[in-house]
């Protein structure tokens, strides 16, 4: 850049030129002030948990690999207890070089990060691979961590109530479904030590003579009328609303009498409430309901019931298993009235325990269900087969010789 000089070597007094020079001065001042900051922003900043290597070229006795303690300090000769948290590797190298100049002639010092700090978060609940996950950054996005966990299990996951528990004990709820549906997705970041819990949806079950029996999500209690409406309503001329049952998860059974006037404001049906985990059963008005037991029990057949039976009660009603050694207990199953098949592993009956019996009592059979307990396939007695074949062969030879 060329500046014209007038008179006794002074710069031109042109206002525009003076304004330009003033701007240039401030620009250069700002540049020199910010350059160290920009340089530091582009380098790795040392933090607690890192492992660093200090190399002094030509002096292997001063070369060390040191972990940065949680207080951000290291122990190194000539520095003593030095705080390095927040320094870049270049800054730490300069600091060590300054100290070594007291003892060495022009020491060449390098500092490297041999192992960055490993931050970790935990993902629990309804994901494919619940586990502890580590990452190098200070923060990691929730979506990235969920992808590392293999994603959520299935459509029974409650994405509206994903819980993030921080290391300090505080927690927050994230509506992940709303977040994913948003056009402007706001990324949720996790900090080291965070726990992500993916819950399962809560359900009530409606079975029996309703149009669409099944499970229906609910986080709070709902009225029986609403539950039946979710199931499409009762099957006309077949549903016995006056003998409906509510089966609680505890095994408690509540007999309720409903009426068909679901639209009335004074409907007494609303006094009956269902809670997450409850089952509402609407029986058939025309026939006595039965539970069928087939297979390797002492008294197979159909048994009339007025309420659901536990799996253990059903086996007892049928006289028990003939011989637990010969029954194929692992292949037992419950064929539901709607045609679905639920496995019912009865292996605990070989060596019954209180916990095993309790588990069998938690499984319910409803009117119209069938319990099947198959018998093991007996192995072929090859010794007996060979003996019979030998006898037949000897007899045939004797007859042939006599002839």
Image (tube, rainbow, N blue to C red):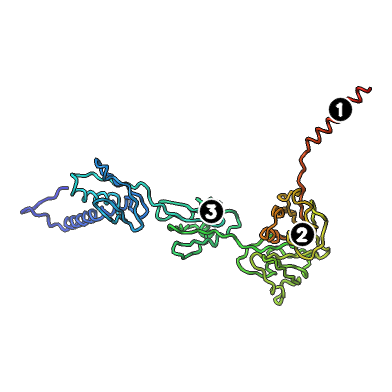
27 or 248, nearer to the observer: 248
Mark 3, other Cα within 10 Å: few <14 / some 14–19 / many ≥20: many
Dot 3 or dot 2: first in sequence order is: 3
Q: Residue at x 54, y 51 (%)?
A: 129
**Residue linked to disc 1:** 394
306 or 225, nearer to the observer: 306
Residue 139: x percent and y percent? 42, 56
Tell whether label 1 touches label 2 (CB within 8 Å). no
Residue 342 in view in this figure: no
Secondary structure of the residue carrying tag 2 is helix
Q: How far, Cα to Cα, is label 3 from label 2?
A: 37 Å
Secondary structure of the residue carrying tag 1 is helix
**Residue linked to disc 3:** 130
Residue 288: x percent and y percent? 83, 63
Dot 3 or dot 1: first in sequence order is: 3
**Residue linked to disc 2:** 314
Q: Is 189 left or right of 278, judged from the image as shown?
A: left
Residue 326: x percent and y percent? 76, 48
Dot 2 or dot 1: first in sequence order is: 2
């Amino acid at each position: 850049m060329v500046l014209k000089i007038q008179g006794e070597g002074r710069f031109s007094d042109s206002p525009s030129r003076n304004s330009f020079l003033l701007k240039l001065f401030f620009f250069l001042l700002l540049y020199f002030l910010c350059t160290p900051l920009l340089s530091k922003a582009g380098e790795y900043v040392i933090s607690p948990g890192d492992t660093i290597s200090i190399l002094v070229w030509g002096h292997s006795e001063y070369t060390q690999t040191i972990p940065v303690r949680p207080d951000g300090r290291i122990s190194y000769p000539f520095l003593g207890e030095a705080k390095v948290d927040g320094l870049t590797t270049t800054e730490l190298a300069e600091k060590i070089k300054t100290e070594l100049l007291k003892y060495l002639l022009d020491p060449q010092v390098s500092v490297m990060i041999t192992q960055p700090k490993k931050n970790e978060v935990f993902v629990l609940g309804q994901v494919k691979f619940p586990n502890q996950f580590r990452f190098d950054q200070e923060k990691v996005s929730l979506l990235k961590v969920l992808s590392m966990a293999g994603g959520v299990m299935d459509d029974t996951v409650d994405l509206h109530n994903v819980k993030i528990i921080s290391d300090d004990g505080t927690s927050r709820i994230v509506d992940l479904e709303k977040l994913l549906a948003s056009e402007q997705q706001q990324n949720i970041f996790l900090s080291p030590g965070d726990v992500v819990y993916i819950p399962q949806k809560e359900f009530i079950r409606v079975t029996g003579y309703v149009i669409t029996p099944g499970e229906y999500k609910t986080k709070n209690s709902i009225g029986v009328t609403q539950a039946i409406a979710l199931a499409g309503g009762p099957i006309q001329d077949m549903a016995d609303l006056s003998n409906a049952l509510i089966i609680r998860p505890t095994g408690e059974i509540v007999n309720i009498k409903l009426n068909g006037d679901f639209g009335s404001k004074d409907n007494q049906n609303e006094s009956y409430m269902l809670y997450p985990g409850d089952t509402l059963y609407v029986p058939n008005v025309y026939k006595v309901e039965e539970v069928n037991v087939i297979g390797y029990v002492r008294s197979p057949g159909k048994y009339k019931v007025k309420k659901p039976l536990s799996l253990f009660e059903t086996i007892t009603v049928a006289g028990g298993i003939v011989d637990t050694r010969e029954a194929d207990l692992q292949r037992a199953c419950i064929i539901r009235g709607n045609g679905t098949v639920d496995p019912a592993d009865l292996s605990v009956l070989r060596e019954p325990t209180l916990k095993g019996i309790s588990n069998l009592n938690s499984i319910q059979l409803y009117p119209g269900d069938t319990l099947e307990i198959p018998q093991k396939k007996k192995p072929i007695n090859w010794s007996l087969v060979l003996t019979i074949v030998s006898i037949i062969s000897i007899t045939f030879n004797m007859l042939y010789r006599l002839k």
